Amino acid sequence: HNEGAIQMASFFPGLLASQLPGMDGWALETLKLTTHAGTHVDAPWHYSATDSSGKRSLMMHELPLEQFIGPGVKLDFRHFPDGHVVSADDVKAELARIDHVLRPGDIVLVNTAAGTRYGEEDYLV
């Protein structure tokens, strides 16, 4: 928090670090991630420099924010064994189970059993 006090003092003209309770400023942490972490939001650039028409693929910062805002639809595939390749029929069956018809703008979230292996040697191998 000592570094934070110095940062706060420079951010707020006239503020002295000594005026902060305990001379503690805000705590800042740095987190470094790749655009690929957790999702494939970095697609289509992640997969190819060009799209199917030969045009340069879009990078994450070029994708419209509206593309990432919408109703979420969770498909629960935790019952499938490790390595199972989900088919179109699997998706149709899950949509029927949750009584949902996909609409433009729906954001599909896929729940797999991978999370049960977190912390184990075979996690996401």
Image (cartoon, helix red, strand yellow):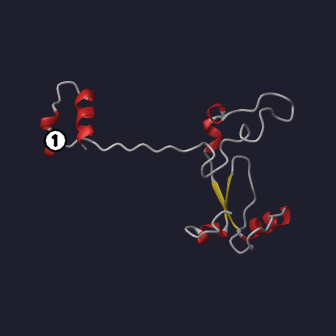
Amino acid found under the numbered disc labelled 1: Met
Residue depicted at 55% across the width and 68% down the height: 119
Tell me: residue 74, above or below residue 57: below
Residue depicted at 63% across the width and 55% down the height: 72
**Placement of the C terminus among the 4 image quadrants:** bottom right
Q: Position of residue 109 (x, y in %)?
A: 66, 57
Q: Position of residue 37 (x, y in %)?
A: 60, 49
Q: Position of residue 32 (x, y in %)?
A: 50, 43
66 vs 83, left or right, is left
Residue depicted at 68% across the width and 71% down the height: 78
Residue depicted at 87% across the width and 31% down the height: 53
| Of 52 and 73, the residue lying toward us | 52
Q: Position of residue 9 (x, y in %)?
A: 22, 30
Q: Quadrant of residue 124?
A: bottom right
| Residue under pointer 1 | 23
Tell me: residue 88, above or below residue 49: below
115 vs 81, left or right, is left
Q: Quadrant of residue 102?
A: bottom right
Element under label 1?
helix
